[in-house]
Image (cartoon, helix red, strand yellow):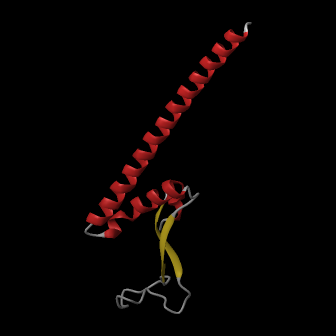
Amino acid sequence: MEAAGLVELHAKQHAEARAQLNTQEAAREHEDMQLTDVKQQFVKTIAEAADLSDHLQGLTDHLQKFTEASAVYIGKLVSPKKSIKDSDDDTAHVDEASEKIISFSHADEDHQFLVD
């Protein structure tokens, strides 16, 4: 093949590779814009929320997605419960003498078994 033919072939290959890279870059930019929109919508939802506890499941899902964590769950320390009798008062079930335990209230999809 002549040198001019080789140059033309390489120029064509380079133009095709460049076009493919431009397409991939445009796709990445579009994906980044979509992710930014999702993040902004979540922030807006939280900012407008009357009760933040209504959005804790959304928070676990959001955190897992955007931190790429293998697991996300929310819990609080509570006193364990003990058996009561009908004659006991309304706080008799709380075992204040025992160490507190974690009660998980929300978890990502793969860790729902931790809830309750």
Indicate the quadrant where residue 12 lies.
top right
Residue at 30 percent across and 60 percent down: it is 45
Residue at 46 percent across and 41 percent down: it is 29
Choose between 114 and 18: the one closer to the eye: 18
Give the vertical position of 29 relative to 54 (above or below).
above
Indicate the quadrant where residue 47 lies.
bottom left
- The percent coordinates of residue 85 (x first, y second) are 41, 87
Give the vertical position of 66 relative to 4 (above or below).
below
Residue at 42 percent across and 62 percent down: it is 59
Q: Return the residue found at the far right.
A: 1
Choose between 16 and 83: the one closer to the eye: 16
- The percent coordinates of residue 94 (x first, y second) are 44, 87
- The percent coordinates of residue 80 (x first, y second) are 50, 82
Choose between 94 and 48: the one closer to the eye: 48
Residue at 49 percent across and 54 percent down: it is 65
Give the vertical position of 74 relative to 79 (above or below).
above
Choose between 106 and 116: the one closer to the eye: 106
Q: Along the horizontal axis of the image, is 22 left or right of 52?
A: right
- The percent coordinates of residue 111 (x first, y second) are 54, 59
* Viewport quadrant of the N terminus: top right
Q: Along the horizontal axis of the image, is 9 left or right of 49?
A: right
What number of labels is visible? Answer: 0
Q: Return the residue found at the far top.
A: 1
